[in-house]
Amino acid sequence: MAISEKGPMRDAVLEIGVEELPARFMRQALADARTYITDALASARLEASEVCVYGTPRRIIVLLRQVAPRQNDLVREVRGPAARAAYDSEGRPTRAAMGFARSVGAAVEELVSRPTPQGDYVYATVTEGGRPAGAVLAEVFPQTIAAMSFPKPMRWGSHDFRFARPIRWILALLGAEVIPFDTHAVSSGRATWGHRTLAPGAHEIESAEEYLPRLRELGVMVDPEERAESIRRQAESLTSSIGGQAVIDPELLEEVTFLVEWPRAFVGRFAEDYLKLPEACVITPMKDHQRYFPVRDGRGNLMPVFVGVRNGGDLGIDIVTAGNEKVLAARLADARFFYEEDMKRPLAERVDDLRGVVFQERLGTMYEKAVRVGRLASDLLRGAPEAALVERTALLAKADLVTSVVREFTELQGVMGREYALRQGEDMAVADAIFEHYLPRFAGDILPASLLGAALSIADKIDTLVGYFSIGLVPSGSADPYALRRQAAGAVLVHTEWRFQVGLDSLAARAASLFGKDGAAEDGAPRAQVVQDVLAFVRARLKASLEEAGLRHDIADAVLAAGFGHPACVFERAHAVAQVVDESWFAALATAGSRVRNIAMKAETDAFSPALFQDDAERELFDAAKSMEADVRASIEARMSGFVDRTAYVSALERMSVVCPVIDKYFEKVMVMVDDEAVRNNRLAMLKWVSGVLSMVIDLSTIVFAGG
Amino acid sequence: MLNFQDLILTMERYWAQRDVTIQQPYVVEVGAGTMSPHTFLRVLGPQPWSVAYVQPSRRPADGRYGDNPNRLFQHHQYQVILKPSPDNVQDLYLGSLAAIGIDPAEHDIRFVEDNWEAPTLGAWGTGWEVWLDGMEITQFTYFQQVGGMEVRPVSAEITYGLERIAMYLQHVDNVYDLKWVGDLTYRDVYHQAEYEFSKYAFEVADIGVLRASFENYEREASRCIHQNLVLPAYDYVLKCSHVFNILDARGAFGTAQRAEYMGRVRSLARLVARAWVDRGHEEAADNGDK
């Protein structure tokens, strides 16, 4: 035991004993507990060498190592009376000074006088002695419990407070002493409850220092990392002995870790015959319903075995294994039944059933959606051979929604569609596109590998966005119940990857025109506004990804202001600007661009005529801008068609900068705001056109220059 | 090895010994023990209430003509309500498993998050499905809201699936092979009924007649509510719900219409719950006067 100046350093432990907590809450709950307790100790000036947080289904544990015996002293200065009131003419303390000293517990000769903006004042230094650790923790521990929040808190018994699940006991110790407090209708003590079957009932713990070893004796592995590691190790050793390898999905491992206090893995078997089913039909019931790990052999083929994890020890493990095998057999029998039913009617025949499936109550059926998606995707594919397949594929892509397997396991949408399409003799390209049109399903997921799949993926997402926006189901703040951000981000990613000629902007407009007669949902918002809102939403996603890619926010804004229908170009333009932003010619270009733009904003018309030019400098700028426009347009188009590499945008900016001296000369020679209205308007309109030409890559006026 | 009858008797005895009132199944068709007024109405309001009963539960869409070893038109739930939920409710539950011969130490019993929700009853709660060696045998719920109202105190609801448990105890893979008592099997008792009710719900039920019945029951339910006859009103809500289930199994609804009918049952259920609670307040006030 370490000894500090003020006494022994002891460990402290808080164990919140609960009925089985939902596994999905646990990570966040433990992280929150750590943050809360760390902050609370800091503000209470109580030191501990380490804060450890553990959790099982039945307990949330905070263990503090080497807690200081007392709070640190708080030393602070207290201001007293003005110096002229505190001392008389001979410098002796007055009654006021003595009263002040007494009130703060200081000796009068310890007072010091110090100048302030209001004149000289006397000050006393006051030391507040720290309270003992036990008294502090008796406040901090119940506050920690009260501060924990959960996604779906509940009430129980006759109480009004809430927690994730009912709290049944609280253990709170500092060294060997109980830290006493009452909260949530429970009094803290030294009792814990052991593992439900390995050490049932209540057990007293002598001291905080003994807590961890004692819990292990009571059949509880408190540390989630240790349980996860144990599950992984057991699964590996059990499967390697039968020539296989358990497939440990991290999310499933996490869940299983928080379903057990003491993991004991076992291997179960199922009839080999089920391996004839599509893999997904075997793996999904195993993982989703039963929380088993599938096993593959050396060649990657699924084996007719699974790894389950029991909460407890070896007793009755054969009964447990047999029971689990029986349950899985029934689930697989169901899956086979569903699959065989599904195979009796090909997808193509099911398309009509989509008329009975609602996409969204106010947006019509899935059939209508599939038709729209097909049309939209064919816009993207204009000229490509895949265009011939796309409308039919769009219908087939949704047809697995009316199969029994997908009704049972919704996460298999697309996966089963591809499977059925292949087994029913559809084209490989069609089958793959059915699967790919849902991609990406989550952050970091794969993207469509075929043009057909990519077009359908974007079309499906844009249709959803435009549809939901048109009936006002728009994400606000952090609330995004229909995962529309993911849809927008997905459309951007796929478009970036596949570089479609048709931009997201025109696609959104087209999508809106496909909804209802007037291009608006029956009772929804008008079309133009919806398209604008959807594009603003897409733009916000793009801006976020540009900033994630490390690009300056002013560069991101400048690039987005010049158009963002083609996200691939957006990224390349942004990188090009980032590359040249510190060059002096670029600064000159930006200055010239801003100058032109500022005056061009006064233009009232777009039309101008070289016939009205009066100065050679006007003609010169017109010619220079015209040839520059042609060159820049050519390099942008060459890039968008993939004929040249991404340096095209740097060259385009460099090409633009050639006009800078011509612009300077123009402003030297030409007075734009002349009295002659026709000449003035002609000049403004031409500058407006020049400004537009200069904005083909970025909006030059929004770049921020250091010192400028 | 417990036969089906002994399984029920053991449950009754176990809960009776723990001061829980043993009640009989409700006689109007219901889809779950929760819908019996012994649960749906009694969990509302402040009065303590502990009850246990078997509830034959009819789910027309689950009928399989007696051909499926696991799915039934009508199955049996053993329903326990403890109001307010006691602190040792999980131990009481585990004790009941031990009483029917399931020793937790030899098995793997797990409480896996599963929050119950019944939109037609305006009800939800938090809790678990309880796994026995990977098989779901019980739904365990702390009611939070019923009939659209927060419930205080909170009741614990324990719903055992008797067929599932019996199949486990008797080591049979087909529900019809269960021993009811002696040589009498589940097949002998229920197979014909399973066939007939499945055939009726899927093929024979007269959609026109049932729609008319739904309307009539609905009207009668509202009439009763307006007369402050809460219990008869609730019976008609249950009848609406059952007729809805048959129509649904018969494929009589499109999506929108299905939602509309569910909405009608839900609003009636809410009215009944509200009326029950309001009357409870009046009675409490009356008693206070005397």
Image (cartoon, coloured by chain):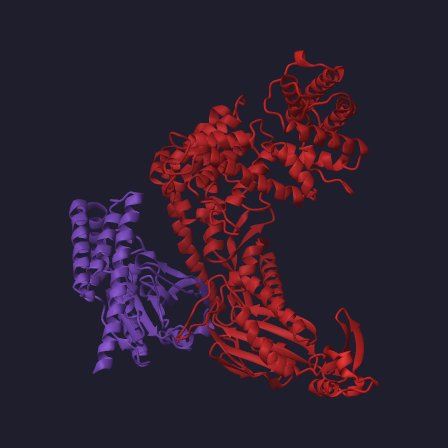
Q: Position of residue A166 (x, y in %)?
A: 46, 72
Q: Position of residue A180 (x, y in %)?
A: 56, 84
Seen from the viewer's position, the closer of residues B53 and A273 is B53
User: Would residue A692 appear left or right of A536 to someone viewing this image?
Assistant: right
Outermost residue to the front: A89
Residue depicted at 79% across the width and 37% down the height: A582
Image quadrant holding the N terminus of chain A, namely bottom right
Chain A image colour: red
The correct choice, above or below, for B41 with respect to B88 in the image is above
Residue A653 lies in quadrant: top right
Outermost residue to the top: A611
Q: Is residue A310 visible?
A: yes
The correct choice, above or below, for B141 with respect to A630 in the image is below
User: Would residue A471 appear left or right of A124 to someone viewing this image?
Assistant: left
Residue depicted at 73% across the width and 81% down the height: A126
Chain B image colour: purple
Residue B12 lies in quadrant: bottom left
User: Would residue A335 appear left or right of A381 to someone viewing this image?
Assistant: left
